[in-house]
Image (spheres, rainbow, N blue to C red):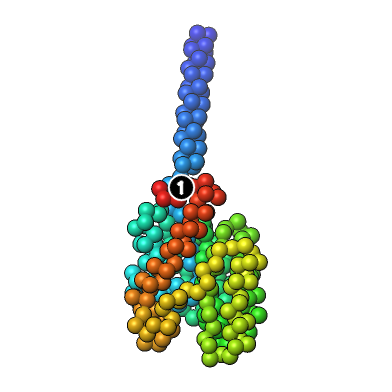
Amino acid sequence: MKLATRYGRSAAAFNSLLALLFWLVSAHAQTTSTASPSTAPLRLAMLGDSLTAGYGVSAEQSLPVRLEAALKAEGRNVTVLNDGVSGDTSAGGLDRVDWILGDKPDIVLVELGANDALRGIDPASTEKNLSAIVEKIKAAGIPVWIIGMMAPRNLGPDYVDAFDGIYKRLADKYQTPLYPFLLDGVATDPALSQADGLHPNPKGVEVIVQHMLPFLNKNLDDHAALVHRPARP
């Protein structure tokens, strides 16, 4: 009888110890999960074509890599994901949206449309595809920032007007940040382009980075304020 009593008391003490340990582990897990979103790098995915992928330059000279380096130099805890595929059109980008969302980005920059224009694809089709991309990303609860493109001028004024207006219309429709023209300051300077006259060389990439930084800084600050995250940890 005394043995049974002692056993009962020991079991009760053991159970109490287990309960205490469980509480401590749970509390630690909650603290960790609460702290990690503010300390983990913000994941900025670039869904794009060869201009994002880094056609004709080394991986270290690609736009996402150089943007990440520039943002880190300014004290920003940001990882830029390279989701560019050379030759991709807006239709190809739409096919890949679910795949990039699997990487759990915090923000997606959409850089598509240049190949649509080079192929003379109907701007209405391009706009429809880009609209579907934005809607898919927003439906996943992820902010979208749009990077604009301009059509080659030899396609005629009607095509140029229809194509160039796509990005502003989408930005207005979805109330999303817009960087009007990715190749601003580069497209008309042969010294900043590769031999094909279409893709930036390493110097051109650096010009794009410097031109994009004010846009990225402003919108990263706005995003940080919205989600209560330190902009520059």
The reply, left or right, for residue 85 in relation to residue 160 is left
The reply, left or right, for residue 85 in relation to residue 92 is left
The amino acid on which the numbered mark 1 sits, given as a three-letter code, is Pro
Query: Is 40 located above or below residue 173 in the figure?
Result: above
The answer to which quarter of the image holds residue 212 is bottom left
Query: Looking at this view, is 48 or 230 the one in front?
Result: 230
Residue at 56% of width from left, 82% of height from top? Answer: 116
Residue 169 in the image, given as x and y percentages of width and height: 63, 71
Residue at 45% of width from left, 76% of height from top? Answer: 183
Residue at 57% of width from left, 76% of height from top? Answer: 90
Residue 22 in the image, given as x and y percentages of width and height: 49, 31
Query: Looking at this view, is 54 or 100 the one in front?
Result: 54
Q: How many marks?
A: 1
Query: Is 125 located above or below residue 132 in the figure?
Result: below
Query: Is 81 located above or below residue 205 in the figure?
Result: above
The answer to which quarter of the image holds residue 52 is bottom left
Residue at 50% of width from left, 74% of height from top? Answer: 181
Label 1 Cα crowd, 10 Å radius (few <14 / some 14-19 / many 20+) = some
Q: Which residue is mark 1?
A: 230
Q: Is residue 226 visible?
A: yes
Residue 41 in the image, given as x and y percentages of width and height: 43, 53
Residue 8 in the image, given as x and y percentages of width and height: 52, 16
Q: Is residue 136 visible?
A: no
Mark 1, secondary structure of its residue: loop
